[in-house]
Amino acid sequence: MRMHIRMLVIGAASAMPLMASGQVGTLPAVDIKAAEIAAMAGPEHKQGTLPNIRVVDAGGHNIAVGALYRTAAQPQPVAVHYKVSEIYYVLKGSATLVTGGKVLNAKVRAADSAQVKAQDGPGESGTAIEDGVSQEIHEGDVVIIPAGTPHWFSKIDQALGYMVIRVDPQQILDLK
């Protein structure tokens, strides 16, 4: 089955800037084409490329849309994003995702790193999770990971392609 994904990000009217005339202004809609997402979520994705396709001001908070492709052969570090929540939509493949628990061998990410400023905000990485909850995720599944929740792919079955939507209420991420 072939899926077509098209996403529009439109700011809420209550968060719109007030114009000089007293009318509410609008933020532009952002159209992200399925081809852009597919290119980032497939094997042709260049290793080490930051996954965010766009980061937009959505009226008082930023929304980032990106995609990732991971293989079973790649090391999978634990991640915790202190201030940015994530929503995963699995496009292809399957994996075991561990959430919650305690991060082992945690290292705080440098505040000036590209990962912090342009990908997912301040946080930490580790090597595994102790006492977390494991769940199998498959094509079509959606996972919501609140800010501060450790998460880790403990196992990837061959390859995993997924779209990630990041909610950045403090507007930490650089607009793109």
Image: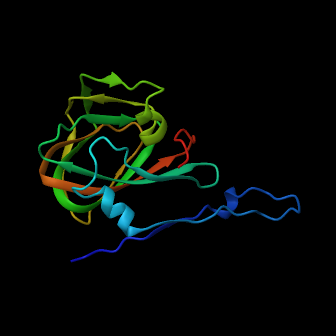
**Which quadrant is home to the N terminus?**
bottom left
Q: Most extreme residue toward the bottom, as rendered?
A: 1
Residue 169 place in picture, x, y as percent:
55, 44
Q: Which quadrant of the structure image shows residue 163?
A: bottom left
Q: Position of residue 105 (x, y in %)?
A: 24, 22
At x 20%, y 33%, the residue is 131
Of 33 and 152, nearer the camera is 33
Q: Position of residue 129 (x, y in %)?
A: 21, 32
Residue 165 visible in the picture: yes
Q: Residue at x 28, y 57 (%)?
A: 41
| Residue 119, placed above or below residue 14 | above
Nearer the observer, 123 or 150 = 123
Q: Is residue 82 visible?
A: no
Horizontal and vertical percent position of residue 11: 61, 61
Q: Left or right: 43 with respect to 89?
A: left
Quadrant for residue 123, please give it: top left
Front residue of 83/53: it is 53
User: What number of labels is visible?
Assistant: 0
Residue at the image position 38 percent from the left and 62 percent from the top: 36
Compared across the picture, whether 75 is left or right of 116 comes to left
